Image: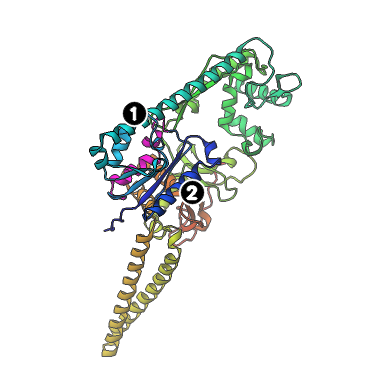
């Protein structure tokens, strides 16, 4: 049974825009937490840290799906004990929602026995006892939440009005003097000399070809494969430039109204209680962008696309692969995707599947891959690193385990000998060997207990989540994938070598594990007469 850690301080850092991460917001909040802990002789926990980067407190996303919500869960499950402290730079880091909801957020924390420290107010403490006994403190807290919410609401209205004014001006008939936006469709550019948007001729011609092929019945996948086969350069620059043409990108091009000169501006709205944002289309503007495609051609293609099962309509479909987002190609390092070939389903390098010409086509049956991974799961999790601070213990465990194996072999040899040799010496030697094996087994057990005691609580929870999701009957694919994403940076299958390399989030080097499909027996030998399967 795990010993509960003593009360200590936990830092919560939040900033609402990614730009603030580039400045001093994070460092300022972190420094303040360290200074408070030092001044009050309190241990500041460096294993469990809570950050919401680019998350606004105005809609409560930090509480519903962010790190603040995780903190509350850790308090409820006992990982963070009563008597601990939550350090925040200012109360509005916890919430900028309306006061009623903001107070509820504080209540969830203090009711569990945690004290909130407002470091901007001289380290003022908010806990259940203080709020119950001091009505003025409670009223001050409510007033601060009201002010924070009003500031956010006012800022939101001001920004919305500014955007609306820009859109109204752009929709007018007067000549442009500067661009409304430089985030343009890939076939359009801004001409500073004429102060107008213009077509990039070569790209506009290629876009028209895509529409013509789609009009003739060619699918988005076939169009992308043809562009990859002919080595057509992808559109984009720098970090935005794709390595090869993707089916999903072709579909976006074929459904973008900018192809017929229609610009559809969008506003972005935060979804209540979630990290996600909702893009809301505004009134289309039909005269600012030059048209690259005839309107009738555009409408024919989009009518066809609307009846062919567009992926956009299935964007919220359940995850179909437990490896989605984490499995990488052993050759090019790119994404491995799940490919349905009718009666058979395979894992294939996405670049090879798209005929990008950058990787060779190899496939592994999906069901076999899942079976092979689950077969070795218990050993994989047992041998998985527990965090950087246990590297020395991991080495000691490996050496002690090796010594234990040798002791077990020696014991077995003496047992065999004692069957034929009934001498007292043989019996004593066997007894000594058994005691040595027991001592070494106990030492390995003690080392593993020490490793687990030192391991990061987050690491242990992630590994436990993987075990629970992958061993559930029946297994939920989406839950299994969620657990793997939470614990794993990437996985690389090497079936010819009978190996699966797993790079955990908390490790610097990949863990090499056994991985045997039915092309290989469990001793790692290829089955006679079984050739590597290739679907194309």
Q: Residue at x 47, y 51 (%)?
A: 505
- Inspect the magenta stretch and tell me whether residue 469 lies in it: no
Where's residue 344, x and y in %?
46, 40
Left or right of 313 in this view: 460? left
Image point (53%, 52%), residue name: 531
Residue found at the far top of this picture: 173
Left or right position of 22 against 80: right
Whether residue 179 is visible to the viewer of this picture, yes or no, is yes
Whether residue 89 sits left or right of residue 209 in the image: it is: left
Q: Position of residue 222 (x, y in %)?
A: 60, 31
Looking at the picture, tell me which residue is in the foreground, 120 or 383: 120
Q: Which residues are magenta?
A: 57-79
Q: Which residue is mark 1?
A: 99
What residue is rendered at 39% in x and 52% in y?
Answer: 37
Percent position of residue 455, x then y = 38, 58
Point out the frontmost of discs 1 and 2: 1
Q: Tell me, what colour scheme is on the image?
A: rainbow
């Amino acid at each position: 049974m795990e010993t509960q850690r003593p009360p200590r301080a936990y830092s919560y850092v939040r900033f609402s825009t990614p730009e603030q991460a580039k400045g001093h917001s994070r460092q300022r909040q972190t420094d303040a937490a360290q200074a408070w802990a030092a001044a009050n002789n309190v241990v500041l926990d460096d294993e469990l840290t809570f950050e919401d980067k680019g998350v606004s407190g105005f809609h409560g996303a930090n509480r519903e799906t962010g790190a603040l919500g995780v903190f509350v869960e850790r308090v409820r499950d006992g990982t963070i004990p009563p008597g601990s402290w939550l350090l925040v730079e200012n109360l509005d880091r916890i919430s900028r929602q309306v006061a009623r909801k903001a107070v509820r957020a504080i209540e969830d924390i203090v009711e569990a026995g945690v004290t909130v420290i407002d470091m901007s107010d001289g380290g003022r403490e908010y806990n259940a006892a203080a709020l119950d006994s001091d009505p003025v403190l409670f009223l001050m807290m409510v007033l601060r939440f009201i002010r924070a919410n009003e500031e956010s609401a006012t800022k939101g209205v001001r920004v919305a009005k500014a955007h609306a004014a820009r859109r109204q001006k752009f929709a007018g008939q007067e000549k442009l003097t500067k661009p409304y936006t430089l985030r343009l469709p890939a076939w359009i550019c801004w001409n500073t000399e004429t102060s107008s948007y213009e077509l990039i001729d070569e790209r506009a011609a290629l876009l028209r070809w895509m529409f013509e092929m789609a009009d003739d019945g060619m699918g988005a996948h076939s169009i992308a494969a043809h562009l990859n086969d002919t080595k057509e350069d992808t559109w984009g620059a720098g970090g935005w430039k794709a390595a090869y043409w993707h089916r999903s990108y072709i579909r976006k091009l074929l459904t973008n109204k900018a192809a017929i000169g229609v610009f559809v501006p969008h506003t972005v709205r935060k979804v209540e209680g979630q990290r996600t944002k909702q893009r809301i289309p505004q009134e289309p503007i039909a005269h600012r962008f030059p048209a690259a495609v005839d309107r009738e051609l555009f409408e024919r293609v989009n009518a066809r696309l609307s009846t062919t099962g567009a992926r956009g309509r299935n964007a919220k479909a359940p995850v179909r692969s437990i490896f989605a987002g984490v499995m990488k190609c052993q050759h090019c390092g790119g994404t491995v995707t799940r490919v349905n070939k009718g009666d058979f389903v395979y894992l294939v390098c996405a670049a090879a599947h798209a005929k990008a010409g950058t990787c060779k086509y190899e496939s592994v049956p999906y069901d076999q891959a899942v079976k092979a991974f689950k077969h070795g799961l218990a050993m994989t999790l047992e041998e998985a690193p527990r965090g950087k601070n246990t590297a020395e213990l991991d080495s000691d465990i490996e050496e002690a385990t090796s010594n234990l194996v040798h002791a077990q072999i020696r014991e077995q040899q003496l047992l065999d000998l004692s069957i034929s040799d009934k001498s007292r010496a043989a019996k004593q030697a066997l007894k000594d060997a058994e005691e040595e094996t027991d001592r070494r087994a106990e030492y390995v057990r003690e080392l593993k207990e020490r490793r687990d005691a030192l391991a990061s609580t987050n690491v242990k929870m992630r590994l436990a989540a993987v075990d629970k999701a992958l061993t559930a009957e029946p297994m939920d694919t989406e839950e299994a994938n969620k657990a793997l994403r939470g614990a794993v940076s990437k996985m690389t299958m090497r079936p010819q070598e009978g190996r699966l390399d797993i790079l955990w989030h908390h490790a610097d080097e990949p863990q090499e594990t056994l991985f045997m499909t039915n092309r290989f027996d469990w001793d790692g030998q290829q089955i006679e007469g079984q050739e590597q399967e290739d679907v194309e």
